[in-house]
Amino acid sequence: MHLEPIHRPIPTIGEIYRGISLVNFSNAVIAFLFAATAPVSIVINIGIKGGLTDSNIASWLFGGFVLNGIFGMVMSFLYRQPLVFFWTIPGTVLIGPALTHVSFAEVIGALYVTGILLFLLGVSGLVKKVMALFPLPIIMAMVAGVFLNFGIDWIKAIGQSPWIAIPMTLTYIFLSLNIKVLNFIPPMIGALIAGVITLIFADYQININELNLMIATPNIYWPIFSWPAIFELVIPLSVTVLAAQNAQGIAILSSKNHKPPVNTITSICGVGSFLTAIFGSVSTCLTGPVNAILSSSGKQKDQYISAFIICLLAILFGVFALQFTKIMLSTPPAFISTLAGLALLRILQNSFVVSFNGKYSLGALICFLITFTDKPILNIGAPFWGLIFGLMISWLLERRISRKKVN
């Protein structure tokens, strides 16, 4: 096994308690608010379009927050650095088109296989060699292809429901203008608050009669292993976990002088992906934005404590996920579409920049077009074929560039 050794000595409870400060507590709260708004709105949006029930979505959120919260606490404790895990946002978006032609049980089966693959890549130490086979521009072109519809839905919401979409959008833009304000109130939090205020002033009725403080009882899903779902989802999901998510989180932590254990992180993503799939959650990943917030300030040696706090908040949130899901599903569609579109705006921008600003741009273009067209071939979804044909075109027509990079 090629797992990195844990950090010794292991922190004591007293050491953790003494290390709590206003800075790491506030960082944890801000990071939690981000995780509990933008990614959740994307899950709900995908769930609605994919025909999932309230119970399916709540179970997804339970697995995504509770189990990943436990993984994050353990990993941050053992390695004394912020290592928070949630679910892959690009992977979540990949699930949406798949649900139009394969069953949820078949999707669960593909998630199981993805978990096994990620675990094997981590414990074998092959993760870096495997990722070298997939040029980042082509991967990000696939991400752009699946994300673009969210941006389009946001623009449509502005035209169809301007009374809610415009205040949320203007608030997001205003908060993005000032770096100092940005550090205290993330634009997505501001957009959420603006949306809630708009609903209150518009006297929009949200059905809360059935809400209570009952603890969630997640669903247990039995997988169906089908080749079409496995071919469509396993490779794209694995690639998005490793390249679109883990690579970002690892780079952010490395830039803050942490030493993230790459092989162990990949293995935990595999175990997490397998276990959370039992409850219907999409594959586990090391989150970039959340770990960036946690490592943005405060004493470096105590930043793992911020991870402890956010993981506790995540577990509590997941336990009551059903109530939050009911509230979100009672809001206007434009509210969810705007939140999801704004949440993915920067990611979509970065995807286009990485895809078309250098090598492999032709292969990236082919990958983007095929993915965005969203037409299955042999009952296997477009993201898989986007990757395959994008790689083929780059190998055939951009081969010299590929050879230079290998050399």
Image (tube, grey):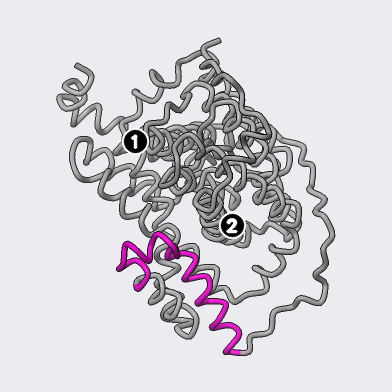
> Few, some or many C-alpha atoms within 10 Å of disc 2 (few <14, some 14-19, many ≥20)?
some
Tag of residue 36: 2
Q: Residue at x 26, y 33 (%)?
A: 393
Q: Residue 253, position in %: x, y?
A: 41, 36
Q: Is residue 236 visible?
A: yes
Q: Is residue 387 above or below residue 336?
A: above
- Per the rendered image, the range of residues in magenta is 174-202
Q: Is residue 232 visible?
A: no
Judge whether residue 181 is colored magenta: yes
Q: Residue 39, position in %: x, y?
A: 54, 55
The CA distance from mark 1 to mark 2 is 25 Å
The image quarter in which residue 270 lies: top right
The image quarter in which residue 40 lies: bottom right
Give the residue at mark 1: 255
Secondary structure beneath dot 1 equals: helix
Relative horizontal placement of residue 212, taking residue 272 as reference (left or right): right
Closer to the camera in the image, 137 or 397: 137
The type of residue carrying mark 2 is Ala
Judge whether residue 147 is colored magenta: no
Closer to the camera in the image, 179 or 235: 179
The type of residue carrying mark 1 is Ser
Q: Residue at x 69, y 33 (%)?
A: 275
Q: Residue at x 27, y 44 (%)?
A: 355
Name the magenta segment's main secondary structure.
Answer: helix
